[in-house]
Image (tube, helix red, strand yellow):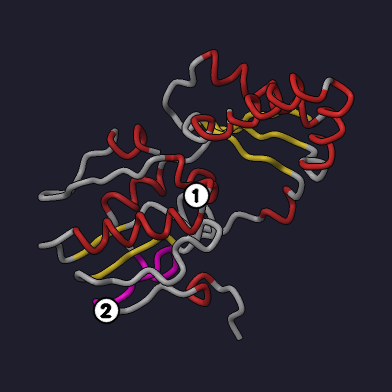
Amino acid sequence: MKEEILSIEPLEDQDFEFVSMDFHLYPQKLKTELQRLIDTSLGYDRIVLAFGLCGGAASGLKATNGELVIPRVHDCISIFLCPEKGCVCDFKKQLGTFYLSNGWMITEKTILSDYQRILEKFGLQKATKLFNRMYDGYKKVLFIETGSASPDEVVRQSKEIAELFGAAYETIQGEAVFIEKIVRGPWDEENFITIASQGLITEEDFGINAK
């Protein structure tokens, strides 16, 4: 998402910090890194996270310095697929879909290296069996075009992942409007969670286990 964010005109006195994509593979490590950045970001009235709940990584984050704002979405996929109004992406209609984008391929391409390692160690038959067991639930790979040019190598690798899964391959144009709202606002209650200073983000804020 870095390229998309930097392409948007920032507000006055607005600074950015970017987290390595590698953290997305480990929600607890992502939480630790986000909290570290929040704790060390001094002198700001508001900190806006360009993240969703992301596997629980955002749950428990504390607004240690000023107000904390986060999109009211379960994962970063929703940020790319959100329409101009609202942030409700109906993933029930897309069950069995594995989402990729230019940025996510930085980490998800490890699927290909893992397969190659298993292939070399155990041979084609066992490697195929193991991957079928690991990714059996995925019937489609959906590559999200995010506005920045996707290198041919990235597109090729995403198609290879679809082939490994034995899944269909499709592309979709992502939305940039909501990313602009993250950068410039307004951070309305319908689409964003606002936590006052010293408050905590909870899963209930995202509608999980809400009564």
What stretch of residues is rendered in magenta?
188-198
**Picture quadrant where residue 40 is located:** bottom left
Q: Is residue 189 above or below residue 162?
A: below
Q: Residue furthest bottom?
A: 211
Which sits in the foreground, 78 or 166? 166
Residue assigned mark 2? 198
Residue assigned mark 1? 76
Chief secondary structure of the magenta portion:
loop
The answer to the question of whether label 2 and label 1 lie on touching residues, with beta carbons closer than 8 A, is no
Q: Is residue 57 left or right of residue 137?
A: left
Which sits in the foreground, 120 or 208? 120
Q: Which disc number belongs to residue 179?
A: none
Which sits in the foreground, 91 or 166? 166
Q: Residue at x 58, y 34 (%)?
A: 108
Q: Is residue 180 above or below residue 29?
A: above
Numbered disc 1: secondary structure: helix
Q: Is residue 145 above or below residue 193?
A: above
For marks 2 and 1, the one nearer the N-term is 1
Cα gap from disc 2 to disc 1, whole angstroms: 25 Å
Amino acid type at circle 1 is Cys
**Picture quadrant where residue 69 is located:** bottom left
